[in-house]
Amino acid sequence: MRIDTEFDIGDEVWLIYRGIGTTGKYEVIGPKQIEYIEVQIGNDCDIYENYECEDWCGFFSPDELFKTREAAEITAEALNK
């Protein structure tokens, strides 16, 4: 079985992350490299991808990762409204 993922190990990405503290706003972090990919197949046969980036603990879903800084900034701004 072959499963194609949105990103590959080694890809450079920008991520959006909800800041900790009083602001609670989404911030753009990066660029970071994808170091680990976790793929799960749910009971509903849907495929779930999670990515771990260099120097960051935890996983990010594809909708939190972007190929360009500009795309990440646009999404973060929209979420912060």
Image (cartoon, grey):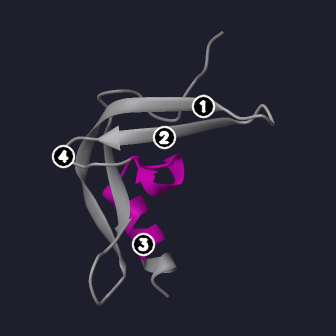
Earlier residue among tags 4 and 1: 1
Residue ID for mark 4:
55
Earlier residue among tags 2 and 4: 2
Residue type at mark 1? Gln
Look at discs 2 and 3 and give the one toward the viewer.
Answer: 2
Earlier residue among tags 4 and 3: 4
The disc label shown at residue 76, or none: 3
Residue ID for mark 2:
50
Residue extending farthest to the left is 55
What secondary structure is found at the residue carrying circle 3? Answer: helix
Residue ID for mark 1:
40
Residue type at mark 4? Asp
What secondary structure is found at the residue carrying circle 1? Answer: strand
Residue extending farthest to the top is 1
* Residue range highlighted in magenta: 59-76
Look at discs 1 and 3 and give the one toward the viewer.
Answer: 1
Instruction: Kindly check if marks 2 and 3 are in contact, taking CB atoms under 8 A apart as contact.
Output: no
- Cα gap from disc 2 to disc 3, whole angstroms: 19 Å
Earlier residue among tags 2 and 3: 2
